[in-house]
């Protein structure tokens, strides 16, 4: 069940800074010293005082495919994603509601993480866990930096945790106008679009808290 978020201003702000907290393809992602934001991205050595969460992301074979670092500062959570070994192209990128990344889950890889992290009654595109899409280059590497005030780190670290999820395909954010008609003759987005944006299979996951 989706957990209801407390009143948090809903905005998602893309930033242009990339930063150098992880060299492309490197596993050197442990924040050791105090730091903050530089050019819109998290500086190397950000503090471990609870303001930082480093999420190690693995694919369904158990191979490490990169990390996502989150720093809470200035009323927002600043996110830096550095991922590799992805299929070139756009990938849906979300926070899911449960911090369990089981590649052998009964309903498919990483379905153990539940649905999108969202408030009750919200459709996809408005979920607190809906993040900007990743764009993997021809070499499979993807980099993304942005800030959001739709959640706090404490909310992501609640009793059952949460998870970072990468999907196999692009995310349409449920943006299907009524003028389009589905194969069943119904107009507008179907249930899969409204819940997950037709982003396809879950190909990589990283657990938070729980």
Image (cartoon, rainbow, N blue to C red):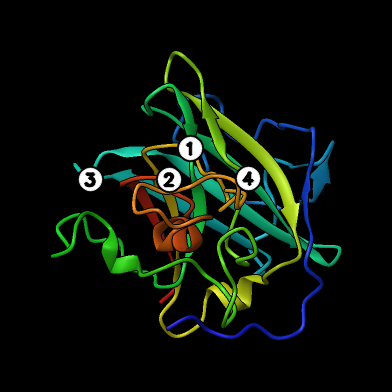
* Outermost front residue: 185
Q: Quadrant of residue 22?
A: top right
Q: Residue at x 46, y 55 (%)?
A: 193
Q: Which mark is residue 132?
A: 4
Residue 170's disc is: 1
Q: Is residue 122 above or below residue 1?
A: above
Residue 179 in picture, x, y percent from top left? 60, 46
Residue placed furthest toward the top: 138
Nearer to us of marks 3 and 1 is 1
Q: Could you tell which of marks 4 and 3 lies nearer the N-terminus?
A: 3
C-alpha span from label 2 to label 4 = 12 Å
Residue 27 seen in the current view: yes
> Dividing the image into 4 quarters, which one contains the C terminus?
bottom left
Q: What distance separates the C-alpha of mark 1 from that of mark 4? A: 10 Å
**Residue 89 drawn at (x, y percent):** 47, 24
Front disc: 2 or 4: 2
Residues at marks 4 and 3 touching, judged by CB atoms closer than 8 Å: no
| x 62%, y 58%: residue | 125
The residue singled out by tag 2 in the image is 199
Mark with earlier residue (1, 4): 4
Cα–Cα span, label 2 and label 1? 5 Å
């Amino acid at each position: 069940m989706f957990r209801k978020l407390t009143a948090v201003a809903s905005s998602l702000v893309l930033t242009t800074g990339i930063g150098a907290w992880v060299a492309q393809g490197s596993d050197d992602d442990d924040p050791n010293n105090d730091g903050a934001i530089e050019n819109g991205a998290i500086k190397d050595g950000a503090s471990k005082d609870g303001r930082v969460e480093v999420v190690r992301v693995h694919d369904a074979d158990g191979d490490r495919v990169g990390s996502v670092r989150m720093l809470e500062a200035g009323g927002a959570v600043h996110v830096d994603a550095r991922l590799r070994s992805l299929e070139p192209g756009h990938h849906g990128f979300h926070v899911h509601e449960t911090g369990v990344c089981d590649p052998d889950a009964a309903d498919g890889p990483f379905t153990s993480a539940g649905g999108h992290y969202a408030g009750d009654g919200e459709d996809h595109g408005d979920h607190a866990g809906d993040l900007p899409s990743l764009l993997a280059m021809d070499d499979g590497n993807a980099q993304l930096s942005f800030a959001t005030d739709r959640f706090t780190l404490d909310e992501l670290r609640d009793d059952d945790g949460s998870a970072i999820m990468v999907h196999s395909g692009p995310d349409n954010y449920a943006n299907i106008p009524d003028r389009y008609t589905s194969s069943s003759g119904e107009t507008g987005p179907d249930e899969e679009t409204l819940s997950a944006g037709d982003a396809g299979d879950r190909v990589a996951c990283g657990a938070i808290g729980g």
